[in-house]
Image: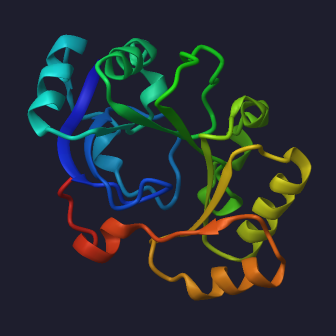
Amino acid sequence: MKVYSIFKSLQGEGLTIGAPTAFVRTSGCPLRCTYCDTPQAFDKGEQMSIDAIMTKVAKLKCRHVCLTGGEPLAQKDAPALLTRLIDDGYHVVLETNGAMPLDELPCVENLTISMDIKCPSSGEADKMLFENIELLGPTDQLKFVIANDEDYEYAKDVIEEHHPSCEVIFTPVGGKDLRHLAERVLKDALDARVLPQLHKFIWGDEDNR
């Protein structure tokens, strides 16, 4: 696999927010979202075996592991790495962008799929595979990164049309400006969580990941 970095930090997003986590950030992504905060992972990185990745992860001494990118599912060995991590007792979160099929992922416990649906402001909304939503279960999470009212209405329509059975998360672009988004979710009585990007509050835009 081509890996940009392996590091320890706090999970900044989603249902395990705040948990010390070993991150495996793969290289490469088929999308070019307008607000992407990890463009450095588009092409840089080194080829690593699954054994080498597992050794580095073990040294970080975390119960939680996040496979992120880039786009992890652009790497053909991602399902094998997920299986190894879970077999070794880690709780694993896979962060994927909604444009990659999920049907070849291992159906196992201790794997949480955190899937984005890209909204119009990303410039990549037309790449989404909405059939993936049906593959998400109660322990997974569906995330929308929202920049404006158009994005909000788009996310709301997707929820109403596809009825996800997992937790739904709304996060503002930039991860900090929560008030307007929170007020809209409350007004519309949406069954969605409004969450920040914790790492943006702690480290700002510093590239420590």
Q: Considering depth in this image, is 24 or 14 the residue closer to the camera? A: 14
- Asked if one can make out residue 30 in the rendered structure from this viewpoint, the answer is no
- Asked if one can make out residue 140 in the rendered structure from this viewpoint, the answer is yes
x, y (%) of residue 125?
70, 49
Q: Considering depth in this image, is 160 or 15 the residue closer to the camera? A: 15
Q: How many marks?
A: 0
In the image, taking residue 142 as reference, residue 20 lies left or right, namely left
How was this image coloured?
A: rainbow
Q: Please, is residue 96 above or below residue 173 in the view?
A: above
In the image, taking residue 9 as reference, residue 117 lies left or right, namely right
Residue under the point 20% across and 38% down: 5
Res 81 → quadrant: top left
Q: Please, is residue 145 above or below residue 209 in the view?
A: below
x, y (%) of residue 49?
21, 12
Residue under the point 27% across and 69% down: 205
x, y (%) of residue 42?
35, 38
Res 79 → quadrant: top left
In the image, taking residue 186 as reference, residue 33 lies left or right, namely left
x, y (%) of residue 35?
48, 61
Residue under the point 68% across and 57% down: 119
Q: In the current view of this chain or complex, which residue is farthest to the right?
A: 161
Residue under the point 32% across and 32% down: 27
Q: Quadrant of the N terminus?
A: top left
